[in-house]
Image (cartoon, helix red, strand yellow):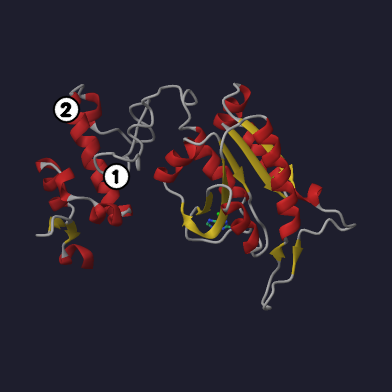
Amino acid sequence: MRLDVVTIFPEYLEPLNVSLVGKARARGQLDVHVHDLRQWTYDRHNTVDDTPYGGGPGMVMKTEPWGDCLDELLADGYEAGVGAPALVVPTPSGRPFTQELAVELSERPWLVFTPARYEGIDRRVMDEYATRMPVYEVSIGDYVLAGGEAAVLVITEAVARLLPGVLGNAESHRDDSFAPGAMANLLEGPVYTKPPEWRGHGIPDVLLSGHHGKIARWRRDEALRRTTANRPDLIERCDAAVFDKKDREMLSILGWEPEPGGRFWRKREAVEE
Ligand code: 6GU
């Protein structure tokens, strides 16, 4: 897979040399190109922004540097025969980045990222490239960052670990929380390793029992416990058909009950606790 990133802070993308993404690059599984947008400015001050039409605070990134840069790097990739590019535009007003979108992006041969600073990029840039390729405007969560570079690191890592051969074991993302088509999207429960006792904290006996069925059940119960506590929306969204008899017992203990419509809701008393 080829990745291009265009930014006014190329050094912000240094982490792409490290860890999983860095190793995927070293192995030739990822071909990463980071570009400094200011190389496509032609004035003394290397201007990339200007005041917004209609007034208001902040600055808007200008069309021309983005257009000239994207034209050049798209021509380069087409010439190299990389495949069909998709533009990924990080913005707090984009669609939420999810595991499902990570899977979709991981299936493309070439992603071009345009992290912006200031109030964002002149709309006409996205409109122009949308006539030639898919454009994904993506947000990584409900908070505001100063720029899209950190989002590029997030998206890149989520996508890279899905590429064939990047994670050691091909099975390792089948059970990810949020894996599409997972039985139910539950958060994963706690994990433990040696030593068996640390500062007076032991580990749950069941994990030492060697009883695989009981261990699987315990893990499922802990996943339900954690999901109801931290992400009740995930339980409410589930088709109740994904919960077996033991799941239902655990949900009941946690203060949840089925509705006639088929979904689970937190019981009133539990909500008020
Ligand atoms: Cl992609 N960019 C910025 N600037 N802020 C964000 C974001 C992206 N996602 C969440 N907040």
Residue at which label 2 appears = 213
Q: The C terminus appears in which quarter of the rendering?
A: bottom left
Question: Tag 2: Cα neighbours inside 10 Å, few (<14), some, or many (≥20)?
Answer: few
Residue labelled 1 has its Cβ within 8 Å of some atom of ligand 1: no
Q: Residue furthest right?
A: 44
Amino acid at pointer 1? Asn
Q: Residue furthest bottom?
A: 55
Rendered location of residue 248, percent (x, y):
12, 47
What's the distance in space between the residues labelled 2 and 1, CA to CA?
21 Å
Rendered location of residue 41, percent (x, y):
82, 53
Query: Secondary structure under badge 2?
Result: helix
Q: Viewer-proximal residue, 12 or 115?
A: 115
Query: Secondary structure under badge 1?
Result: loop
Q: Residue at image x 12%, y 56%?
A: 258
Amino acid at pointer 2? Gly
Q: Report whether 13 appears left or right of 235.
A: right
Q: Viewer-proximal residue, 70 or 93?
A: 70
Ligand 1 quadrant in view:
bottom right
Question: Tag 1: Cα neighbours inside 10 Å, few (<14), some, or many (≥20)?
Answer: many
Please tell me which of labels 2 and 1 falls first in the chain: 1
Q: The N terminus appears in which quarter of the rendering?
A: top right
Residue 135, labelled with which disc? none
Tell which tag, 2 or 1, sits nearer the viewer.
1
Q: Residue at image x 28%, y 56%?
A: 232
Q: Residue at image x 25%, y 28%?
A: 207
Residue labelled 2 has its Cβ within 8 Å of some atom of ligand 1: no
Q: Report whether 94 appears left or right of 147.
A: left
Residue at which label 1 appears = 185
Q: Residue at image x 48%, y 23%?
A: 165
